[in-house]
Image (cartoon, rainbow, N blue to C red):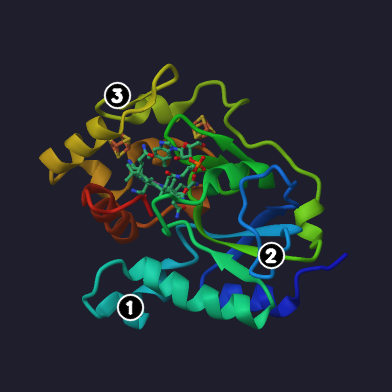
Amino acid sequence: METPAADLTDSLAAAGFFVLGGFSPGHGDPIPALKSGKHPRSLLLVGSTGQTLWPLLTSSPEFSDEKPDPLDRYTKRILSAIAIANDLEALFPFEGPPFHPFQQWALACGGFSQSPMGVLAHQRYGPWTGFRAALLSELVVEVAVASKVDGPCETCRDKPCISACPVSALSIENGYDVPKCREHLVSMKNASCWSGCLARRACPIGEDHRQDPANARFHMDCFTDISSTGQ
Ligand code: B12
Ligand code: SF4
Ligand code: SF4
């Protein structure tokens, strides 16, 4: 069994990313074959939180070249190079439609639960993880077969995320009402939500991993731009 190379962990960290978890895909799992035609034996989920990526992204060339989707372009440039250097194949969440089922893959990694907000909440990072790439390997990597833990939502009795939304866009019964949320943001340019979704901020898990207001604003701009997908 392989442990992820220290080089991999270090080069991910230097660019604002880290391995959130992994799993060993079965033959029935929705996962593409490797370029060799073989079935991947490990999927490593690479992500970032509110704190790790933003300072590096904002000082990258992609952030100031005035072209669209700086986060996606930065991610693809850096993580494609890291994948090649480590004999891995990278898949990205923004490639599509059809999109790769990153949230299903995250649930298979363990540590995540489906929150009422659509995003998955992590037992350590709460609702503040973004998925940046899946790295596929033909080897069995240790993190992929590590024991899995549950995410936080099932045992969260009060679910403060739901009541924190000012326009009741979240409910246990109906989940997340995307048009209602978007309408609120678009119609109220000074709404507090522009500095960060109030529902996500109400989650007691992962407070240290929140996005700061400028970072949250960047993601809200992407979200309210209807040609864009969630980042
Ligand atoms: C399309 C899309 C959207 C659409 C949703 C349309 C829809 N109803 O499906 C829109 C543009 C509305 C959207 C919004 C947001 N999104 Co979005 N989105 C995606 C994207 C690119 C594809 C989803 C998909 O179709 N997958 C294909 C299916 C087959 O895969 P799946 O895993 O089975 O799909 C699950 C999701 O679709 C989920 N789902 C269904 N409806 C919605 C709605 C929302 C808002 C979310 C988050 C999930 C979700 O349920 C499916 C079953 O588990 C994914 C990236 C990806 N590749 O998964 C990001 C993704 C799901 N989004 C994400 C995020 C963070 C957001 C935002 C919070 C962005 C922000 N502002 O910060 C917003 C939510 C708004 C808010 N108030 O904060 C993250 C979630 C991370 C996590 N921890 O779970 C992802 C994984 C992107 C990433 N790079 O990390 N998103
Ligand atoms: S407040 Fe509770 S239910 Fe809501 S995302 Fe956080 S842990 Fe999950
Ligand atoms: S951004 Fe605001 S309106 Fe949208 S779900 Fe979060 S709290 Fe509700």
| Residue at horizontal 47 percent and vertical 62 percent from the top | 51
Q: Position of residue 143 (x, y in %)?
A: 76, 58
Ligand 1's quadrant is: top left
Q: Which residue is mark 2?
A: 37
Q: CA distance from mark 1 to mark 3?
A: 36 Å
Name the one closer to the observer, 114 or 188.
114
> Upstream in the sequence, badge 1 or badge 3?
1
Horizontal side, residue 163 vs residue 18: left or right = left
Look at the numbered disc 3 and give the secondary structure of its residue.
Answer: loop
* Residue depth check, mark 2 versus mark 1: number of the one nearer the observer: 2
Label 2 element class: loop
Marks 1, 3: nearer the viewer: 1
In percent of width and height, residue 8 lies at: 67, 75
Residue 47 position, x and y percent, is 54, 59
Q: Is mark 2 within 8 Å of ligand 1?
A: no
Q: Mark 2 is on which residue type?
A: Gly
Q: CA distance from mark 3 to mark 2?
A: 47 Å
Q: Position of residue 136 (x, y in %)?
A: 66, 63
Q: Is residue 184 visible?
A: yes
| Left or right of 182 in this view: 6 | right
- Disc number lying in front (3 or 2): 2
Task: Mark yes or no: residue 110 visible.
Answer: no
Q: Which mark is residue 168?
A: 3
N-terminal of the pair, mark 2 or mark 1, is 2
| Lateral position of residue 214 relative to residue 171, left or right | left
Amino acid type assigned to the residue bearing label 1 in the image: Glu
